[in-house]
Every structure is written in structure tokens, then in C-alpha cells.
Image: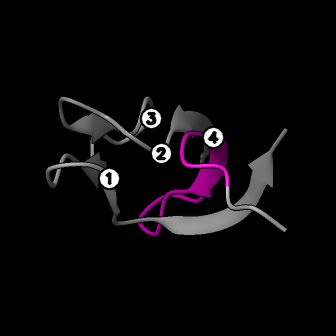
Amino acid sequence: MQEVGSRFIRVRCKDCGNEQVLFNKCSTKIFCHICSSILAEPKGGKAEVKGEILEELE
């Protein structure tokens, strides 16, 4: 099976438990809508996800 590079992912904030859908290749920091913790940071390609990845969406 061929890996698809760009996907949306559902992430849970480790601080407040809020769930958000975000793109796995972000170009800016992604913050939690509830507590403003960083959920993901750009790292020259795929994002470094700081929260818990719950699922990859198709």
C-alpha cells in the first residue's frame, strides 16, 4: 500500500482534552481553540504533533 503524504488528522489536546481536526503539514503553529496550547508545529514537511493523534481522516 502506498503512503499518502498529506492528510487531515484528529488530535486531542493533552492539556484540556479538546479534539480538533488539523492538516498534518502545517506552515504555522496550530493552537487549541479552548486553552491555546500548541497542538502542532511546522518542522520542514510534516508537522510535529504535540497532542494525541486519535485518527487519520480520509
Which residue position holds label 2?
A: 24
Which residue position holds label 4?
A: 7
Which residue position holds label 1?
A: 47
Disc 1 from disc 2: Cα separation:
5 Å
Residue at x 30% of width, y 36% of height: 30
Earlier along the polypeptide chain: callout 1 or callout 2?
A: 2
Disc 3 from disc 4: Cα separation:
23 Å
Which quadrant would the C terminus be assigned to in this image? top right
Which residue position holds label 3?
A: 34
Q: Is 30 left, or right, of 4 in this rendering?
A: left
Name the quadrant containing residue 35. Answer: top left
Mark 3 secondary-structure assignment: loop
Q: Do the residues labelled 2 and 4 touch (CB within 8 Å)?
A: yes
Q: Where is residue 23 in the image (x, y as percent from the top left)?
A: 50, 34
When the figure is inspected, residue 52 is found, relative to residue 16, above or below; the finding is below
Q: Which mark is residue 5?
A: none
Disc 1 from disc 4: Cα separation:
11 Å
Identity, as a three-letter code, of the amino acid under mark 3: Ile
Q: Do the residues labelled 3 and 1 touch (CB within 8 Å)?
A: no
